[in-house]
Image (tube, helix red, strand yellow):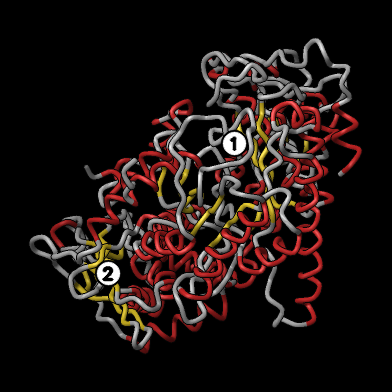
Amino acid sequence: MPELTLAEKLEILADGAKYDVSCASSGSSRRNKGGIGNAAQCGICHSWTADGRCVSLLKILLTNACIYDCAYCVNRRSNDTRRVILTPAEVAELTIGFYRRNAIEGLFLSTGVVKDPDHTMELLIEATRILREEHRFNGYIHVKVVPGADLLLVDRLGRLADRVSVNMELPSRESLKLLAPDKSREAIVAPMKRVGELIVQTKEERKVSRKIPPFAPAGQSTQLIVGASGESDLQIVSLAAGLYGRLAMKRVYYSAFIPVNTDERLPTVIGTPPLVREHRLYQADWLMRYYGFAAGELLDEERPNLDLALDPKAGWALRNLHLFPLEVNRAPLELLLRVPGIGVRSAQRIVGARRGGHLSLDDLARLGVVMKRARYFITARGRFGADLAPDAAGLRLRLTERATAKIRWSQPSLFDAATAIDIQSSITGEL
Amino acid sequence: MILRYDGTFAGFLSAVALARERGIKPEAITDREPEQQGLFAAIEEVATDRDRAEELYRLISRTLPSGALQTLRYAFHSCEPGREILLFRYLELGLATGPRFGAMLAHEAVIPVWKLARAVGREAHRYKGLVRFQQLEGGVWYAAMEPDHRILPLIAPHFAARFADQRWIIHDPRRGEAVVFDPARRKWAETSLEVTGPLPLSAGEELFRDLWQRYFDRLAIAERHNPKLQRQNLPLKHRGHLPEFER
């Protein structure tokens, strides 16, 4: 076969990396120390692709060759695709070239597994090292940790990168065994635990001496595929809550399953991927991280799945109508955050603005509250702004988003017969 | 009474200082030509007085909470017609109120200024990502952009820190303004600039343009195709100088 050009290699390696949904470039404030680049704490988007997703980092694989054969993965061993590899120096050069043109915030480097996990990790570390030491690059770098690699390599990588991540991909041990038979749950969780420990430990050490290099200052993240296996939203959200709580996880990403392979172990998806479900999971995730909700408030054994027609915050409010309406001039911030139509920023602005005088319903709209939703749940100066009392029937209907009804998607039937598998305990038991 | 100033922040502060000294409430403060204004209003030209402007600035810094100063600065860089009189009312209220001003977020003199500042802040943040450099023959990195507001001086510090080893120019051709960075002195400066005709590009530029376009095309996932969301996140008006949308 003729040698491929750099552009052709880049195309193949971008193709293999694009299913990784993480694009964040936030959370690190690395400064430019006499070289090129820095990291912006808030993250910066540089473009948006035709699927509406933002482009922030150069997201590529070092290689799409892989010794594993995971059912859902486009790069699996048994797929008949052209395999290419970049040298660590080529990865670094591409990154710098795009960065100097301000097309990217930095690099997101992932890879297939060549030879063995340790060898592959060393290639990733080398690419990162060249960027940091030879190009004196201080921009954002996110690197994937290869499951099964020596934990000492994880330590080295985290000293160079801003963020590291291990993709869990499948929410339970059973799904993993079925769909990714070469990877064990232990091989995935061990580096996550190590990263979590090092993040916490390094933060403590840096309080004593700033000379100690930070370890993954933008934290660690992971990704879960939604809809390739039969777990409920309750299982997924509980798993995410565990990851945030116990492994110092910064972000969990949810990726609607897109069949890139035909495989009898995978569910058949008709029409679009489960994008609405993915969206609801992100909303639930935000409620846990920024709004003070616990997983158990959003879902329980009786309702193990999120309502696709209603956002989870409105759903919670409808189940807790006895708490409403809230008087916005008195309610504490924690309760304001629970009102549908009031976001984190508008809640903070309410708290700031009411120090300057009692707020009216009109003031609230000016402060950025979405009154269309919030008016059923609040009073201002004792006034209620809706024609419908919050306990009236039909409120649910008013809060339901209409557009969602059109999207069709099918639930996998994979575990329908075999729900005897105790997925729940395997998720909550070990993390 | 209409006060006319030279369009600079110092000039605006001079006009505000003048109005405050005389105890007048101007109908408008503007940097536009007189014929665009009402026929019957009296127009007074205000000369920019640096000392007077600085004195007022110190008073504002002392009296207003720091967030308000930032709001003032960002809102001034908006291109909304009539912004100056909104800023004047905002300042009058702030200087009369003092530290308690920070809590007056819902006041009718505060909300419009806050909204202007928010729009400018959002655009400045957006353009930290949308500015695209091309290397010219001779090594200078050049970027053109056409933002709604005058954000050049607001984004310049970001690029000065990030590309501290590059000679770069960010150009707003619609307004004929530019920011130029000198890596030797690590300083940026505003200047007027007009570019006539195509600029000569350096040798590597074509390659990286091609690499970027091909990379970008591969990134979208077909099953998630959603041009409406793409337009929502990146309106067409911001795409003019992005190589991935130029074919």
The residue at which mark 2 appears reads as B141
Callout 1: residue from which chain?
A
- Relative height, residue A170 to residue A193 (above, below): above
Residue A99: % across, % down: 40, 62
Give the mark toward the camera: 1 or 2: 2
Question: What residue lies at 61% left-to-right and 63% top-to-bottom?
Answer: A162
Q: Quadrant of residue A327?
A: top right
Q: Chain of mark 2?
A: B
Which residue shows up at 70% across the image and 31% down it? A384
- The image quarter in which residue A1 lies: top left
Q: Nearer the viewer, residue A231 or A375?
A: A231
Q: Which residue does the numbered mark 1 point to in the structure image?
A: A370
On screen, residue A360 above or below B49: above
**Amino acid at the residue labelled 2:** Trp
Query: In the picture shown, does residue A172 fall above or below B216?
Result: above
What secondary structure is marked by label 1? loop
Q: CA distance from mark 1 to mark 2?
A: 43 Å
Helix, strand or loop at label 2? It is: strand
* Residue at screen point 59% across, 56% down: A143
Which amino acid does the dot numbered 1 rest on?
Val
Q: Residues within 10 Å of mark 2 (few under 14, many from 20)?
A: many
